[in-house]
Image (tube, rainbow, N blue to C red):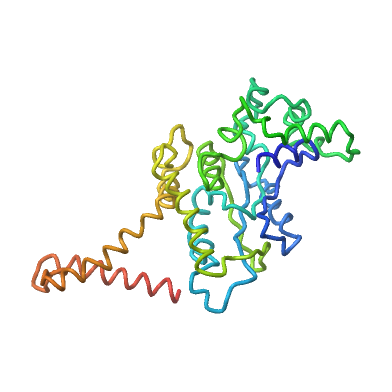
Amino acid sequence: LNVLLRVSSTMSNSPYILVLDCDMYCNDSNSARQAMCFYVDPRTPSSLGWVQFPQKFHNISGTDIYDSQLRTTWAIYWPGFDGLQGPVISGTNFYIRRKALFGFDIDDGSVPKDIRDCFGSSNEFIKSISQNDKSSAIKSRDISPVLLEEAHFVASCTYEKGTIWGDKVGFRYDSVVEDVMTGAYLQHKGWRSAYLNPARPQFLGTATANLDELLVQGIRWNAGLLEIGLSKYCPLIYRPSRMQFLHKLATTWISLFPIEFLSIWCFAIIPSLCFVYGIPLYPKVSDPFFIAFAFVFIASRFKGICEDFI
């Protein structure tokens, strides 16, 4: 992704970038217009970094017993995040502001002083950075041999040596889920995002079709999330941070989501063991703690009914 980011800077330098996985395609050409409505709206804060669309799939089976379409994420989690600082980058289907990935200061948009140490030694690429997010940066021109040579140079394997690419510039290299890591890092710097889920799917792709594919994908995602949640990059403790406190809690919960299986194991094992050994698991009606237990039980059932029917 960082290679494509640099090459596109030397070739076109559009201030906004569409990121798509290789197994996704655009299902509605109006997606760009809908995303740009957020960026050009005068009521939108200048800190808006990207507009995230949900992932929809064309090969979902009638039963979808493994929930390959990730209904909970797109229908519940991300709308909730949208009420805070916005969802983190979700791998694909998002329009992002180029200067957000280049580490620009969110307040004044100033270019770093040691620009070559940060971005590398390509003159054409350095020139594109100084013109970033300006209408004059986009113009029709022939692709000259010099420009092609520059594009090959910024795409070379050794270009990032001695720079901060993958650390403070571009997509992060610290986790196998570089999208979540990059999104959280940008939100720590003060950037926000917006979640847009129109009735017509703007992008369609191919979902996991069997248990083997689901396990491979799930292991990668869960391992990457734990890399973030159990490291110094945990959103709750990362410093410096301009992320809202509630958003820190929500993002930390997402990064630690893989260990939720512990509570499920306890729920499956402890009641059975208590039944076998005759250990009372729940308070008796005459117990003073029964009122608290009854309140929690009734409240949880009522919440489930509301989610299903309201």
Q: Quadrant of the C terminus?
A: bottom left
Q: Is residue 199 left or right of residue 68?
A: right
Asked if residue 73 is positioned above or below residue 88 in the image, the reply reads below
Q: Quadrant of the N terminus?
A: top right
Asked if residue 190 is positioned above or below residue 84 in the image, the reply reads above
Residue located farthest toward the left when viewing the structure as drawn: 286
Asked if residue 210 is positioned above or below residue 129 in the image, the reply reads below
Residue 231, horizontal then vertical, whole percent: 41, 40
Q: Is residue 162 left or right of residue 235?
A: right
Picture residue at 51% right of the left edge, 59% below the top = 216
Residue 174, horizontal then vertical, whole percent: 51, 39
Q: Nearer the viewer, residue 229 or 283?
A: 229
Residue 189, horizontal then vertical, whole percent: 53, 36
Picture residue at 56% right of the left edge, 41% below the top = 191
Q: Is residue 174 left or right of residue 58?
A: left
Q: Nearer the viewer, residue 155 or 63?
A: 155
Picture residue at 73% right of the left edge, 41% below the top = 15
Residue 180, horizontal then vertical, whole percent: 52, 47
Task: Report which quarter residue 139 is drawn in.
Answer: top right
Task: Report which quarter residue 93 is drawn in.
Answer: bottom right
Q: How many marks?
A: 0
Residue located farthest toward the bottom when viewing the structure as drawn: 62
Picture residue at 76% right of the left edge, 42% below the top = 14
